[in-house]
Image (tube, grey):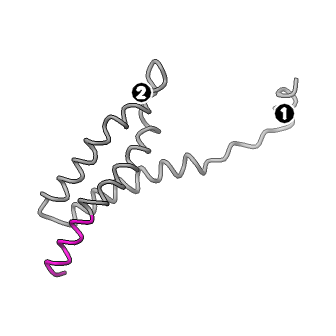
Amino acid sequence: MTARARKWIRIGFAGPGAVVIAVVVMAGMALWLPGGAAQIDNLVLPLILFPLIWAALFFHACLDGRLARVALVALGLFVLHGGLVAHKFLDKPAKAGPSATAEAQS
């Protein structure tokens, strides 16, 4: 790979890649963080940590000498948290049996 190609890949991970991955991590964090006393801590904390997540991904992409490690960390976070979000939205509720529907109607 040429130095020019590595530079553009690094720019992609530091620029739009860092923003997209930070948004996905923020969405995934809401699923694994505990709710807290008011049941909103899992929603507020990722919003507050978003700039920190973005900055960590940005500086990691800019300062790490190995481009493969940058890609591995960024894509690993993306796949892990994207999978959590996808599982949450694709998870279908269990089919209710006849006894459950009878109790719900009464």
> At 19% across and 66% down in the image, what residue appears?
67
Q: Locate residue 100: give its quadrant.
A: top right
Please tell me which residue lies in front, 39 or 68. Answer: 39
| Residue carrying label 1 | 101
**Mark 2 residue type:** Asp
Label 1 Cα crowd, 10 Å radius (few <14 / some 14-19 / many 20+):
few
* Residue 38 is a magenta residue: no
Tally the numbered discs.
2
Q: Locate residue 21: give its quadrant.
A: bottom left
Please tell me which residue lies in front, 65 or 45. Answer: 45
Is label 1 or label 2 in front? 2
> At 21% across and 66% down in the image, what residue appears?
10
Q: Main secondary structure of the magenta part?
A: helix
Q: Which residues are drawn in magenta?
A: 1-12
* Residue 11 is a magenta residue: yes
**Mark 1 residue type:** Thr
Q: Is residue 88 left or right of residue 23?
A: right
Q: Which mark is residue 41?
A: 2
Residues marked 1 and 2 touching at CB (< 8 Å): no
101, above or below 26, in the image: above
Residue 59 appears at what percent x and percent y?
Answer: 17, 52
